[in-house]
Image (cartoon, grey):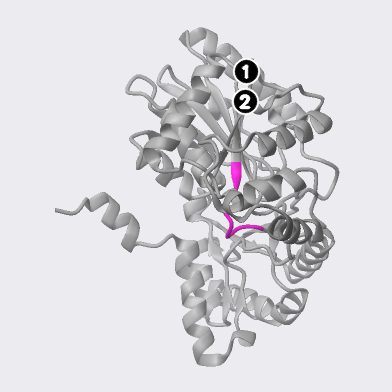
Amino acid sequence: MIAKNMLALGTNRSVIRDLFEYGNQRAKEIGRENIYDFSLGNPSVPAPKEVENAIRAILDEEDPVAIHGYTSACGSEEARKAIAQDLNQRYHTCYSADELYLTCGAAASLISVLRALMTPETPEIICAAPFFPEYRCFVEANGGQFRTIPAQEGDFQIDFQQLENALSEKTTAFLINTPNNPSGAVYSEETLRTLAELLENKGREYHHPIYLISDEPYRELTYEGTAPFPASFYRNTVICYSYSKSLSLPGERIGYVLVPKEADSGEALLGAVAGAARASGYVCAPSLMQKVIAHCAEVRPNLEEYRKNRDLLYRELTQIGYQCVYPKGAFYLFVKAPNGDGNAFSELAKKFDLLLVPGESFGCKNYLRISYCVSHDMIQRSIPAFRAAFEKAQSEAQPGT
């Protein structure tokens, strides 16, 4: 016997991965240089020199057995102290190593937190569109109920009336991602204050806390100042973090969960996170990467290449006639489909070897996501294809053509 739900997850790729694999096959036919692949959020900027130097120093100077051996299940104290110190310096907090659990990247962080929070009495996780499609998988595959509220188009902040209507006594958490994948929007301080007040009030009404799960792999990728830190506004915030984007380490799978002691049942919740990680087989994050983070917790990414890519793509596409959300963070451009249908335009764009992710799985079916963490040269070469796809969509929309 085979679990049918797991078989379905394993044999039906996400739309992002499906498009990426289509590009790989197409590249074999016409050459990689002729494919304009904007599908994956795979950092194109190399890891900072500090990371490379730390890896070399660790391999050259430390005991090989210790480098590759097990650490404590929650992660090495050295790494957790370094992370806490970095957060405290930046956000004027007073976290300790005991409030952190190191994980195999953001996915492991999220799944561990979700499993720790979802119960038969409070199975609901609410998320505002647009959202990372795997959230639905993480929630539903672990026995929860994933509920969404529509996007607030224009600025992609939160529609609080929709959120208030969606919250119920079965809600255990509201899940956010800021800076956001796919829109590039950054939640403002005003948004976070309003959110904190709403969740606090609803928690009192339902006689149990409603936690805020903040997924933050793009925290350091902001172009107009720093992103407000959600935990500074709401004490029942649980932070899920990954170094995949900030340090360009997506394949190394290193991140953490932060559960502040001041949160309701904070110590018990962190214990439940540890239990969920154990049950999921996520015990002990990669040891070498823990040592790297201990050396590099304060290192920040160089955003100039991403900024150049954003500015070029936004300028050129809006001049062509595309309607784009101006991204203040992450490395994605969220574009309204010229024909009003993200799926249809994604298929049309393939005719020009332009790979754009349709927005339906993000909760916005009339949009497309463009990942601009690619080479600047590819973006420049892709502009004629964007123009041709736009003109084709326009001509097909005209009566009698």
Q: What residue type is labelled 1?
A: Lys
> Does residue 347 lie above or below 307 as drawn?
below
Q: Distance between the residues labelled 1 and 2?
A: 7 Å
Q: Residue furthest bottom?
A: 30
- The mark found on residue 99 in the picture is 2
Q: What residue type is labelled 2?
A: Glu
User: What percent of the width, then of the height, locates residue 293?
Assistant: 70, 46
The quadrant in which residue 219 appears is top right
Which residue: 74% across, 36% down? Answer: 82
- The mark found on residue 261 in the picture is 1
Mark 1 vs 2: CB contact within 8 A = yes
User: What percent of the width, then of the height, locates residue 59?
Assistant: 68, 59
User: What percent of the width, then of the height, locates residue 271?
Assistant: 48, 24
Badge 2: residue crowd in 10 Å (few <14, some 14–19, many ≥20): some
The quadrant in which residue 200 appears is top right
N-term mark: 1 or 2: 2
Magenta highlight range: 249-255
Label 2: state its secondary structure.
helix
- The mark found on residue 224 in the picture is none
